Image (cartoon, helix red, strand yellow):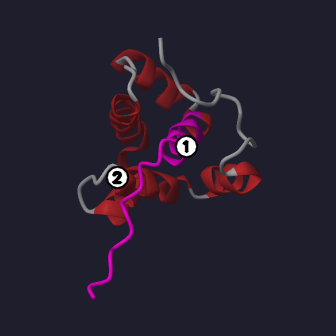
Amino acid sequence: MASWSTGLFDCCGQPGGVGLCVRASLCPCTVLGDINERLEGPCGFVGGCCCGCIVEPCCLASMSTAVAQRAGFEEGCMKASCCSIFCSCCYMMQVYKETELKSMKKPDQQQMR
């Protein structure tokens, strides 16, 4: 059965490394903004930042289930909620890394010729 590509406590691992760990610890709303943008969520990066500032655990739990679904596996709502509440920083990095590893980025804009 498929699962996350990185471990929950693989905080300083690649992709992201120590920089992601510092960013998620000091300014987690920007990491949620990146995840929301990659999921093409409401209002993109800014929407994720605002949601992260107001209701971080709810926002993270919702985004993590969406990322898991796109990556081809299921993340239970209860597990996502518990991880978002009790291990939010580590869980956020795990979700972010999954978007990196599974290339959940918007394609670059093509230039018209």
* Mark 1 neighbour density, 10 Å: few (under 14) some (14–19) many (20 or more): some
Q: In this view of the protein, which residue sits in the foreground, 83 or 54?
A: 83
Q: Is residue 13 left or right of residue 31?
A: right
Q: Position of residue 69 (x, y in %)?
A: 34, 29
Residue 36, magenta (yes or no): no
Residue occupying image coordinates x 33% and y 49%: 39
Q: Residue furthest top?
A: 1
Whether pointer 1 and pointer 2 mark residues with C-beta atoms closer than 8 Å, the reply is: no
Residue 107, magenta (yes or no): yes
Q: Is residue 19 left or right of residue 24?
A: right
The vertical placement of 46 against 83, above or below, is below
Tag 1: amino acid: Leu
Give residue 65's quadrant in the image: top left
Q: Position of residue 41 (x, y in %)?
A: 27, 52
Residue occupying image coordinates x 38% and y 26%: 72
* Mark 2 neighbour density, 10 Å: few (under 14) some (14–19) many (20 or more): many
The vertical placement of 70 against 78, above or below, is below
Q: Is residue 60 left or right of residue 93?
A: left
Which segment did they paint magenta? 91-113
Residue occupying image coordinates x 34% and y 52%: 51
The vertical placement of 74 against 42, above or below, is above
Q: In this view of the protein, which residue sits in the foreground, 91 or 98?
A: 98
Q: CA distance from mark 1 to mark 2?
A: 24 Å
Q: Which residue is mark 2?
A: 51
Q: Quadrant of the C terminus?
A: bottom left
Of the image marks 1 and 2, the number of the one nearer the N terminus: 2
The mark found on residue 43 in the picture is none
Circle 2: element type:
helix
Q: Position of residue 30 (x, y in %)?
A: 50, 60
Q: Which residue is mark 1?
A: 101
